Image: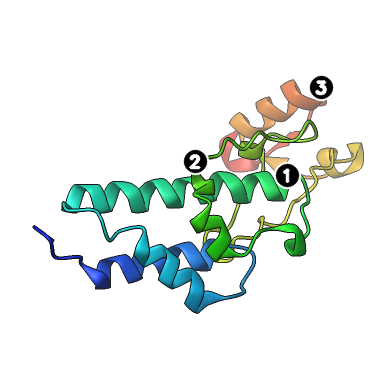
Amino acid sequence: MSGDFIPIEFIKTRFNEFFNLYPRKHGKPKAEKEYIKLFTKLKTEQEIITLSSKILDGLKLAVNYWSSNKTEVKYIKLPSNWLIEELWLDTYEPSSEAAASDVPINPRTGEPYPSYEYKKPTQFNIENCSYSRPLAEYIKKLHGVMVRITEDEE
């Protein structure tokens, strides 16, 4: 990557990362064309790497924003329009319900990871299991109950 040469394979690879993360999978050829167009005036390898990173970082913030606000895919701009309007430069504020950083996103699918609710174990579950000494002390501190310690650690 040097001089006036645009490393098209690198840019296409970065576009594929972008499109794989983008939640609305419509108009891939047009989006790719718009993505490549963004790099036509750049001259150095560092400029190309920086711009592609900024676009991907901005998209990650947008995806977290859309996830935390439960935005339906049909209300998300087409990827080509998102690129034309340079929306990776926008500020995406998390909703009042959840901060964007609290919503982990699977980078391969662009979808949030499944959420798992933590349920406090019942007294019966806690007391009828044996634990190593450090774990038993932690459970006692956390839940305020005494538990059995495994035989090999007593």
Neighbours of disc 1 within 10 Å: few (<14), some (14-19), many (20+): many
Q: Residue 89 carries which label?
A: 2
Disc 2 to disc 3, how far (Cα)?
49 Å
Q: In this view, does 55 lie to the left or right of 135?
A: left
The label shown at residue 98 is none
Q: Which of marks 3 and 1 is nearer the N terminus?
A: 1
Q: Where is residue 84 in the image (x, y as percent from the top left)?
A: 50, 57
- 2 relative position to 149: left or right: left
- Residue 104 at least partly seen: no
Q: Mark 1 points at which residue?
A: 68
Instruction: Kindly report the distance in space between the C-alpha atoms of the residues bearing marks 3 and 1.
Output: 34 Å
Amino acid type at image mark 3 = Gly
Visual colour scheme = rainbow
**Element under disc 2:** helix
Are dots 2 and 1 in contact, CB under 8 Å? no
- Residue labelled with disc 3: 144
Identify which amino acid the numbered label 2 is placed on.
Leu
Residue type (three-letter) at the residue carrying disc 1: Ser
Which residue is situated farthest in the bottom direction here? 29
State if disc 1 and disc 3 touch (CB < 8 Å): no
Residue 26 position within the rendered picture, expressed as x and y whole percent measured from the top left: 62, 74
Dot 1 falls on a residue whose secondary structure is: helix
Seen as rendered, the residue at the extreme left is 3
